[in-house]
Every structure is written in structure tokens, then in C-alpha cells.
Image (tube, rainbow, N blue to C red):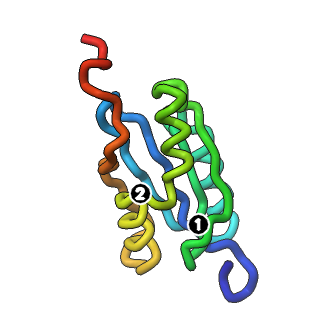
Amino acid sequence: MSWFGGKDWNIVAVIFEKPDMYRVNGNRAKGSDSTKMRDGAKIHPRTICWAVFDQKRAFVEGGTGKGLVSVAPTIGARLVRDLPKLKTVQEILSFLEKGTGDKAAKALEWDGYPPAEKFPE
């Protein structure tokens, strides 16, 4: 929340790119733009999961997206559970909190990707 009670959120979404690479997109938004940004992350067709944090890094809300169908249920559950603790998410949140920019994206560094032999040829 900002000084006058408005929203000042960091919205993070994990986006499916390919079976062995997901991307973390982060946006900082204020006021009514916060809600629009969150809703955009929720309905994006490749969003596996998303979360909203305030500027003190407190979790506000989160959930899964339409892209969840692109990954195994166990992978989706692990991503949702671990999202706030993931190194890449923490880096994105740090960048957004500093106010140097209001958008950031980075490939997810994670040890939970499915083994390569499970990918279709």
C-alpha cells in the first residue's frame, strides 16, 4: 500500500516458454493499474502461476493460470508452493522494489524442470 492507501504492487508471473524453460515476468504497478496488471497475469494463456507482493515483499495474493495445463501437476504444485522463495523471483522483486524500472523478465533458474527424456521429439 502506498502512503494514501492506494495499491503499489509487484506482480510476478511464471510463463511457460518450452518444457525446459519458463520465464519470470515482473511488473510494478500502482493504483488501478495494479488490478489491471494482476488480471492480465491471471488470464495470460501461458501463465503457469502468478503472485502479487507489496513493496515490503509481503504476499498479497496468487494462484494458477491457464498455462498450468502445459506442465505436469506435480511441477505446477511445486511452482506455486515455492514461487516466493525462488531465486529468480527474488531477483525480479528486488529490481522492482528499487524503482529503477517497472518491468523485468528473466528465464527461471530452477531445479524442478522435468527431465529431458520426458520431452516429445
Secondary structure beneath label 1: strand
User: Along the polypeptide, which appears first: circle 2 or circle 1?
Assistant: 1
Which residue has dot 2 on it? 86
Query: Is residue 13 positioned above or below 35 on the image?
Result: above
Q: Position of residue 111 (x, y in %)?
A: 32, 44
Q: Seen in the image, is 116 located left or right of residue 83?
A: left
Which amino acid does the dot numbered 1 rest on? Phe
Q: Residue furthest top?
A: 121
Q: Position of residue 28 (x, y in %)?
A: 51, 67
Say which residue appears at 55% left-offset and 59% top-offset: 11
Q: Seen in the image, is 66 located left or right of residue 23?
A: right
Q: Residues within 10 Å of mark 2 (few under 14, many from 20)?
A: some
Which amino acid does the dot numbered 2 rest on? Leu
Query: Is residue 47 positioned above or below 62 on the image?
Result: above
Q: Nearer the viewer, residue 92 or 102?
A: 92
Dot in front, 2 or 1? 2
Say which residue appears at 46% left-offset and 45% top-offset: 14
Which residue has dot 1 on it? 53
Q: Residue furthest bottom?
A: 3
Q: Position of residue 74 (x, y in %)?
A: 51, 32
**Rendered image: mark on residue 74:** none
Secondary structure beneath label 2: loop
Q: Nearer the viewer, residue 4 or 50?
A: 50
Real-space CA distance between mark 2 and mark 1, rounded to the nearest whole angstrom: 14 Å
